[in-house]
Image (cartoon, rainbow, N blue to C red):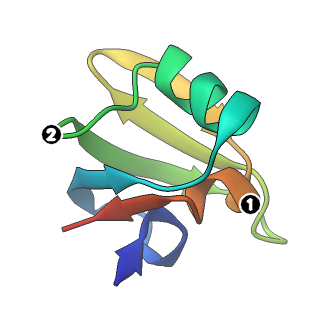
Amino acid sequence: MRTLKDIQVGQTVTVRKLHGDGPVRRRIMDMGITKGVAIHVRKVAPLGDPMELNLRGYELTLRRADADMIEVE
């Protein structure tokens, strides 16, 4: 299983499944990250947290802990 946390800068992947429960999962979905969405990893901070992403024409910042809950293909 590959998660968004494992993806290198410059790659584009498609969301396969969201893991986790409750408010964390809801927060991820509120950002527009749902099954089938293409995500481009734009930049990762030097220490690995946070990640900057492009999806649906928006730029987002996501914590690595949250990125680990997003399964990608």
**Which class describes the residues within 10 Å of circle 1: few (<14), some (14-19), or many (20+)?**
few
Front residue of 36/6: it is: 36
- Residue drawn at (18%, 68%) of the image: 73
Q: Which image quarter: residue 21?
A: top right
The percent coordinates of residue 31 (x first, y second) are 52, 19
Q: Vertical placement of 2 versus 31: above or below?
A: below
Q: On the rendered structure, is 7 left or right of 14?
A: right
Q: Which mark is residue 36?
A: 2
Q: On the rendered structure, is 9 left or right of 36?
A: right
The percent coordinates of residue 56 (x first, y second) are 26, 19
Front residue of 57/20: it is: 20
Going from N to C along the chain, the mark reached first, 1 or 2, is 2
**Mark 1 sits on what residue?**
65
Q: Secondary structure at mark 1?
A: helix
Instruction: Calculate the distance from the C-alpha at mark 1 to the C-alpha at mark 2.
Output: 21 Å
Residue lying at the far right of the rendered structure: 47
Q: What amino acid type should be assigned to the residue bearing mark 2?
A: Gly
- Residue drawn at (32%, 46%) of the image: 40
**Which class describes the residues within 10 Å of circle 2: few (<14), some (14-19), or many (20+)?**
few
Q: Vertical placement of 52 versus 26: above or below?
A: below
The percent coordinates of residue 53 (x first, y second) are 48, 39
Q: Vertical placement of 24 versus 11: above or below?
A: above
Q: On the rendered structure, is 57 left or right of 29?
A: left
Q: Which image quarter: residue 33?
A: top left
The percent coordinates of residue 65 (x first, y second) are 74, 60
Q: Vertical placement of 34 versus 16: above or below?
A: above
Q: What amino acid type should be assigned to the residue bearing mark 1?
A: Ala
Asked if the residues shown at circle 1 and circle 2 are in contact, with their CB atoms under 8 angstroms apart, the answer is no
- Position of the N terminus by quadrant: bottom left
